Amino acid sequence: MITSIVVPCYGEADGLPILYARLAATSEMAETDMEFVFVDDGSTDDTPAVLRKLAESDSRVKYIALSRNFGKEAAMLAGLRAARGDAVVIMDADLQHPPELIPKLLEEHLAGADQVVARRDRTNDPLFRRNLSRLYFRAVNSVVDVRLADGEGDFRLLSRRALDALLSLTEHNRFSKGLFAWIGFPVTVVPFKSGIREHGSSSWSLGSLVNYGVDGVLSFNIKPLRSAIHAGILLVIGSAVYLAWQIINALMVGVDTPGYLTLIAAIIGLGGAQMIVLGIIGEYVGRIFLETKRRPHFIVKESNLDTPRLPR
């Protein structure tokens, strides 16, 4: 049995030697052959050079350097397409995902699980981010067609059949958390305490997290479009009720004041509603536009892979 460890990297030159050492130590404890597939997502530091050096010292290390920064989803997909293991573990390079948990994931996989999900307890997250995450997952689960759990991220093990099912989904706008849930298969959850980033800082800004959250909402349902219809109906009903009230009020007591404020409020309210609806429609149309281009998810600049396992 071969287990592939897929690690997307961006600006992780300082931490990669430590991560590799811990992965190598973990491989000695696991009763399986391992390969380490690192994907450099267009880093501007020495990450590619570090990966070359690691590959020269250990034949188990495979690396893929992308031509530019395509984003974590594309980097993860590149690694998953390159992985040849019977089981594949996905993890981050910043050491917040402890490599020492991999034997436990393998143990649960051998017990019959096609997906073994590592769920973190978020104790090391800032309070604001922790609460915001909880609110986000509650909101998302109320509208999406699959269920997402707080604390369940990309750190997980996939069986070969689960991975093949995942790779058969070729959409350009990828939201892996939703894709993992969509493919199904038996799932086991392993709790863990997240580590602390030892080098550098996260490349996830508040803006990028918000955009990622929007991707999660729009990638797995069309309920926002249906909600726009409902909102439009409510606006029409509200306008009719308000108009009836104004007519009755005028007949009973007359018109005491001009309707300037009412007119402006109606224009602003309806204009804002229209902008929201157009934005929702625009998001879906934009995604259709990107899908029809059929561009590759990523472009490889350099790799030490010796077999044609890379992108279509």
Image (cartoon, rainbow, N blue to C red):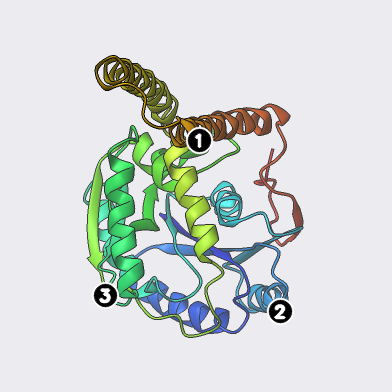
Q: Amino acid at mark 2?
A: Asp
What residue sits right under mark 1 in the picture? 264
Query: Nearer the observer, disc 3 or disc 1?
Result: 1
What residue sits right under mark 3 in the picture? 123
Residue lying at 33% horizontally and 32% vertically, measured from the top left = 145
Query: Nearer the observer, disc 3 or disc 2?
Result: 3
Q: Is residue 77 left or right of residue 1?
A: right
Secondary-structure class at tag 3: loop
Q: On the image, which quarter does residue 27 sit in? A: bottom left
What residue sits right under mark 2 in the picture? 46
Q: Assess disc 1: are there few (<14), some (14-19) or many (≥20) residues with their C-alpha within 10 Å of its C-alpha.
A: few
62 or 273, which lies in front?
273
Q: Is residue 288 left or right of residue 302?
A: left
Q: On the image, which quarter does residue 242 sit in? A: top left
Residues at discs 3 and 2 in contact (Cβ within 8 Å)? no
Q: Earlier in the sequence, mark 3 or mark 1?
A: 3
Q: Amino acid at mark 1?
A: Ile
201 or 276, which lies in front?
276
